[in-house]
């Protein structure tokens, strides 16, 4: 089973405008709202590939109910822990450039953390846990340590897509797969990363720690994959950008979908890049048909000798 864990889910309220000006009244041409948060997006894209997953995390209030109901309507199993706080609404402005306003993560009590740990303790060997999105500041470092240790002991493959201090902490352990974007990678090494060579230099350091698969996403500039025996650089795909929210999550989902279907890692990476762009070229997350189509166009340059 694939479990996604979103500790700070959201309802993503996206507004589409021709132009956006701060300090002015802006009227949207269209809006949409979908269940959001990185792990939840991963579950929604996996479902596009007919891969079942269970969405874990913390939800509360009317927005929490909306998320649970929408996921269930899409056929995604949920096993959320209820919080007293109403789940945040993240506002996205899709205009000439994208602006995002993400609410704070919920406060999670020790009891609620324990409940989550108990769920992880029931996972089986070869299961996946995708820990994605903001990790609330109330989540203790000991809890994260125990969660990673439990995954290691059970033989669960841990994928990580988060940022800030929790990412720093998780990188001192050895997840199976990690997908930072270039800013998050820079943050990890306390530097600013701008060139492909820099991405490769720092990405390799993650691989040397024992992380099996590293994808560094570069937004409109494409992405780079690194493992112990391969570096692959994907050129960006061109298209009409509609809404980039969830592009990174789509990438994570497509990579895992392909890995579970026993595709080669380079093919899995190719699909990951296609899925990221397919989402960027869509109003909601990508659909499978577009991913399959774009996957044919992704140009990947492989450098096995740069490790
Ligand atoms: N404007 C864009 N045009 C084409 N592809 C894009 C665009 N933005 C994102 N993508 C695709 O989605 C992937 C993930 O996007 P990115 O913004 O790096 O992730 P994150 O949302 O996690 O920061 C990129 O590596 C790329 O393949
Ligand atoms: O947990 P964070 O870092 O605040 O991010 C949450 C936001 O990220 C998203 O999951 C989108 O993530 P990506 O664009 O990085 O793929 C939104 O659905 C959500 O609003």
Image (cartoon, rainbow, N blue to C red):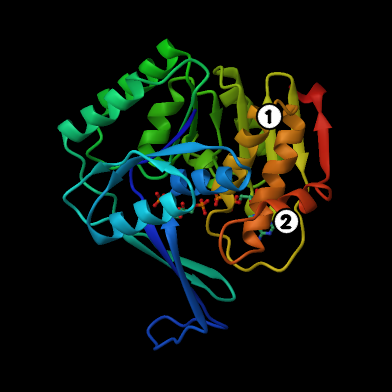
Gap in angstroms between the C-alphas marked 2 and 1: 19 Å
| Residue 222 in view here | no
Instruction: Name the spot of residue 45 as percent of width and height, x first.
Output: 57, 47
Which is nearer the N-term, disc 2 or disc 1? 1
**For this view, does 161 lie left or right of residue 123?**
right
Quarter of the image with the C terminus is: top right
**8 w.r.t. 1: above or below:** below
Task: From the image, tell me which residue sits under label 1.
Answer: 261
| Residue 49 in view here | yes
- Say which residue appears at 16% left-offset and 50% top-offset: 84
- Say which residue appears at 47% left-offset and 19% top-offset: 156
In the picture, residue 18 is in which quadrant?
A: bottom right
Instruction: Name the spot of residue 39 as percent of width and height, x first.
Output: 45, 43
- Say which residue appears at 53% left-offset and 81% top-offset: 17
**For this view, does 49 lie left or right of residue 174?**
right
Looking at the rendered structure, the secondary structure element under dot 2 is: helix
């Amino acid at each position: 089973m694939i479990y996604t864990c979103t500790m700070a889910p959201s309802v993503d309220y996206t507004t589409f405008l021709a132009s956006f000006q701060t300090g002015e009244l802006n009227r949207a041409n269209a809006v949409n709202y979908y269940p959001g948060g990185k792990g939840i997006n991963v579950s929604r894209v996996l479902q596009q590939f007919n891969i079942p997953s269970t969405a874990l995390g913390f939800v509360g209030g009317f927005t929490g109910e909306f998320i649970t109901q929408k996921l269930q309507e899409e056929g995604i199993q949920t096993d959320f822990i209820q919080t007293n706080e109403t789940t945040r609404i993240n506002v996205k402005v899709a205009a000439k450039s994208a602006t995002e306003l993400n609410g704070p993560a919920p406060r999670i009590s020790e009891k609620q953390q324990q409940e989550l740990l108990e769920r992880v303790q029931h996972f089986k060997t070869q299961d996946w846990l995708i820990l994605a999105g903001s990790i609330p500041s109330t989540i203790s470092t000991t809890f994260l340590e125990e969660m990673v240790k439990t995954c290691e002991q059970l033989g669960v493959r841990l994928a990580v897509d988060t940022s800030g201090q929790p990412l720093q902490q998780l990188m001192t352990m050895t997840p199976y797969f990690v997908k930072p974007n270039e800013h998050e990678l820079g943050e990890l090494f306390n530097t600013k990363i701008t060139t492909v060579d820099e991405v490769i230099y720092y990405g390799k350091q993650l691989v040397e720690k024992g992380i099996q698969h590293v994808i560094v996403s570069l937004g409109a500039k494409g992405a780079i994959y690194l493992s112990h025996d391969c570096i692959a650089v994907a050129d960006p795909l061109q298209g009409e950008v509609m809404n980039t929210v969830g592009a990174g999550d789509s990438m994570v989902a497509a990579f895992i979908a392909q890995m579970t279907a026993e595709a080669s890692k380079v093919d899995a990476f190719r699909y990951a890049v296609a899925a990221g762009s397919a989402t960027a070229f869509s109003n909601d997350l990508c659909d499978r048909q577009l991913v399959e189509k774009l996957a044919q166009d992704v140009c990947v340059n492989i450098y096995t000798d740069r490790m």
